[in-house]
Each structure stands twice: as C-alpha cells, then as structure tokens.
Image (cartoon, rainbow, N blue to C red):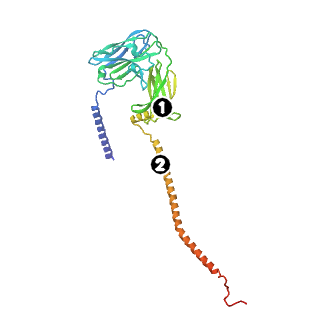
Amino acid sequence: MQNVTQKIHTSLAKKSFFLICLIAALCFFIPANAYAEGEESNLSVKAELPDNQLTKDAGYYDLEVKPGQTQELTLKVYNMGDKETTAKIEINPAYTGASGSFVYALDASKRDESMKIPLSDIAKTDEFISIPAKSEADVKINLTIPTEPFEGIIYGGIRVTDAEGEKEGNSKSEKEDSGFSIANKYAYTIAMRIRENEELPKSDLKVKKIVASQVVGRNAVKVNLQNPTPTIIDKVTYDAKIMKKGSSDVLHEHKVNDYRVAPNTNFDYAISWDNKPFEAGSYQLEMTAKSEVTGQTWNFKQNFTISAKEAKELNDKAVDLEKDYTKYIIYGAIGTAILLLLIIILLVTLSKKRKKKQRRKKGKGKRPANKKGKEASNGSGKQSSGAKRKPAGKSSTPSGKRKR
C-alpha cells in the first residue's frame, strides 16, 4: 500500500514539474509589448475649459453661448515620444452608432437632414499641428456662433489622430466613454456641446424606414430610427418584435437598454433573423422605446415587405445560414401520402380486374358441360315419350283374340 502511494506521489510530482516547465516556456515566448491598444500612442489631449463652461469638472467642452458670439478655445496636445510628431485635427458632428454610443469619426457630409447647424460649420481649426518631442502644443479652435438664435444643442467632437500612425494604416473602431473616447491607438476625441440656454425642446423618436439587410454577413432587419430634435436622449431601452402581418406569433425579437441617441441623427437598430433565411412576404414591426432620463415612451407599429428578389440576394450572401427544412418535410409527407394513395388505388383496380378475369375463365370452362347434359336430358326425354306412346289404330290386345 505504501509503495502504491509513493508511486502516485511520484507521478503527480512529474506532472506538476512538466506543467511548470510548459507555463514557463509559454511565458518566455509571449511578446513583452503585448499591451492594450492606446499604450503605444505618444499623444494625449486635454481640454482647457473656459469661463462659460457649464459642467465645471467635465473632461469635455459644455459651453453656454450667445447669438453672434465669437470665442477662441484651447486644446492641449501632448507628445510623450522621443521624436517630433504631427497630429491631425478634425471637427465632426456626433453621430449615433449602431451600438447606441456616440461616434465622432465621420464628417458632416453624412449628417441627418434635421441637423441644421453641424459643429464643423461654427468651429474651425488648423488641420495639422507639429508637436516637438517630450513637449506639448496648443490647438486653437475658433468658435463663431450664428447671429440668429438656435434651440437645443449643437453637439460634436474634436478628433485628434497621429498623422504618422494613420499613414501606417492603424485605424481602429471608435469607442465612446463619457465625452472622452479613444478612436484607436493613435486617436482621441474631446466632445463639444454648445447651447444658448439650459431649456431644451422636447425629445422625439421616429421610424424612418425598415429594410431587410445584413450585419456582419448575417441576415437582419434594420429599423432606421431618427431623433429629429436638437437634444440628447439618454438611457434608452428598446424592445422590438417582428411578426407576420396579421399574426400575433413573434418570429424575431431584440431588446437592449442603456442606449444613447445624439441630437439630429438617425441610426440603424438591427433585429437579428437568428441565422434563418429570409422569406418573401409582409411583416409587422412592434417596437417600444423608453428613456429613463426624460420619462418618455415611444410606441411604433409599422408594416414592411421583403420581396422575393431581396430574400434571394441576401440569402445567397448570408453566412452560417440555418436552412428551414420544415416546409420540405411537409411537402415530402404530402407527396408520399399522394403516392401511397395512388399505389393503393392501382392495386385495388388491378385486383378487381384479376378477379373479374378469373370469373370469366371459370364461366367459359363450365358452359360446354352444361350443354351436353342438356342434350342428353332432351334425348332421354324423347325416347321415354316414344315408348309410352302407342301406334294409332292398333289395339293393345293380341290379334285374332277378342274379348267376349
């Protein structure tokens, strides 16, 4: 027993030693520079907040302005690298991303038709700035407010990217975080919110259109929602259901919460088709949107159609598509039932014909025997009749003898 225990301990020790060696080898081969995105960038930014800043402790611009006002803002850009670098400065309106966050990477050419004054129209700066090594530079932003009063919020961002990094093709998707976002390991954005007073118009949400589409190669229906008001709608919960038109059975559903909607923007709210193929037909959307901040609720009920052409084109391109074989099973079952019925009818018909033919054969075999029997019966009947019949004119008594 002691030997067995000793062998077990020896085996475990060997396995433990092997695992330690394996882990050490893996650690040796892992690159030392495998850090999170953003650490490789030598740039950083900081907003110098002016006196007309409403949110004093914010890391972004939140300005109260007056009609016709002009103002110069300062954005500090730091270069922590050992070489001089060039930063690219862009001023863009805020868009609503499909994930419910704000996006600042697109220029005003993509703006919603309800956006009357994009930030890039009233805020101007130099496109490029050089920053010496281990130093900083001030980016001057010239703000010119329209002379005619505007309501609500003008919202956007100042996007700073490493021009050298962009040349190397290191662009990544943008992330938003409380007004300060990292677009990639060379890009940063400082949000800017401008308003003339703190009274804001009532927010609104509308459904612009509903289309069959795809997200990352997978079938989905996109509901294009629009915020036509110059207000930010925060902490929005969406609950969307899709049914066949005239039916209450839910085919697909998608629910999210804590979404944001930028002023005067539209975005696509995607409802997954759950890797199923599109089928041509008429459908109905029932959707509810609710903002915890404003307390508003929007209810949408709208019909839409997927054409046979759209369904085929999207299904042909879709990845990981799960084919629905139900209808084929039903068609196959119906076809099999019809085939079995035809076979049964055929067998019954053939059986009846065979029986009828057999009866005819039996009938033909019996008819000659009956005829001969009749002839024999007729002959014997004649003879019997002749035997009984007496010749005419002859007496039944012998000739020459008379009865007296």
Q: Using the image as rendered, state which of residue 235 and residue 21 is in the foreground.
A: 235
Q: Residues within 10 Å of mark 2 (few under 14, many from 20)?
A: few
Tell me: residue 332, above or below residue 193: below
Element under label 1? strand
Residue 263 visible in this rendered orientation of the protein: no
Q: Which percent across, then down, holds residue 45? A: 35, 17
The mark nearer the N terminus, 1 or 2, is 1
Q: Looking at this view, name the residue that lies furthest to the right.
A: 404
Q: Are marks 1 and 2 in contact (CB under 8 Å)?
A: no
Quarter of the picture containing the C terminus is bottom right
Q: Residue at x 50, y 16 (%)?
A: 201
Q: Looking at this view, name the residue that lies furthest to the left.
A: 83
Q: Which percent across, then down, holds residue 190? A: 38, 18
Q: Looking at this view, name the residue that lies furthest to the front.
A: 393
Q: Which residue is mark 2?
A: 336
Q: Using the image as rendered, state which of residue 128 and residue 384 is in the foreground.
A: 384
Q: Disc 1 marks which amino acid?
A: Thr
Q: Using the image as rendered, state which of residue 29 and residue 139 is in the foreground.
A: 139
Q: Which residue is mark 1?
A: 305
Q: Disc 2 marks which amino acid?
A: Thr
Q: Residue at x 50, y 26 (%)?
A: 289
Tell me: residue 10, above or below residue 114: below
Q: Which percent across, then down, holds residue 19? A: 30, 37
Tell me: residue 72, above or below residue 250: above
Q: Quadrant of residue 263?
A: top left
Q: Residue at x 45, y 25 (%)?
A: 259
Residue 76 visible in this rendered orientation of the protein: yes
**Distance between the alpha carbons at the discs numbered 1 and 2:** 34 Å
Q: Which mark is residue 372?
A: none
Q: Using the image as rendered, state which of residue 261 and residue 279 is in the foreground.
A: 279
